[in-house]
Image (cartoon, helix red, strand yellow):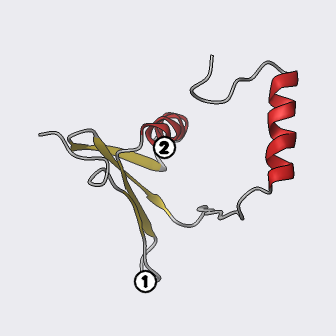
Amino acid sequence: MILTKIEQETILNFNEGEDAVSLYTYNRKLQKRFDKLAAEHPKAISRKESGHGAVTYEFSKKPLVVSFRAPLSAEKQRQYIENGKRYGIQPKGRA
């Protein structure tokens, strides 16, 4: 079964009454990041295939840090692009 992009969700689930956090995701970048963390900390992060390309990670919320940032200003974006060019980093999708 092939899921549409809309159906390929990422869900971070935790509540105030329990210590456990569940991250369910189809996002490949997030999976790579959490696979690396799970390999480095196998006792702290568990990984379970959820089917159709999704993976569920479970871990304690004690060390959890979730960060939300404001959008970058046009000037900050320009600075990042210039720094990337200086170090030979190309924006995604460009060769």
Q: Identify whether 82 is placed above or below 87.
A: below
* Residue, disc 1: 17
Picture quarter with the N terminus: top left
Q: Nearer the viewer, mark 2 or mark 1?
A: 2
The CA span between labels 2 and 1 is 26 Å
Q: Quadrant of residue 47?
A: top left
Expressed as whole percent of the image width and height from the top left, the position of residue 81 reads 80, 35
Q: Quadrant of residue 10?
A: bottom left
User: At label 1, which amino acid type do we have?
Assistant: Gly
Expressed as whole percent of the image width and height from the top left, the position of residue 73 reads 80, 57
SS at mark 1?
loop
The residue drawn where x is 42% and y is 37% is: 28
The residue drawn where x is 29% and y is 44% is: 54
* Residue, disc 2: 30
Total numbered badges shown on the rendered structure: 2
Q: How would you rate the neighbour count of disc 2 (Cα within 10 Å): few for under 14, some for 14-19, many for 20 or more?
A: some
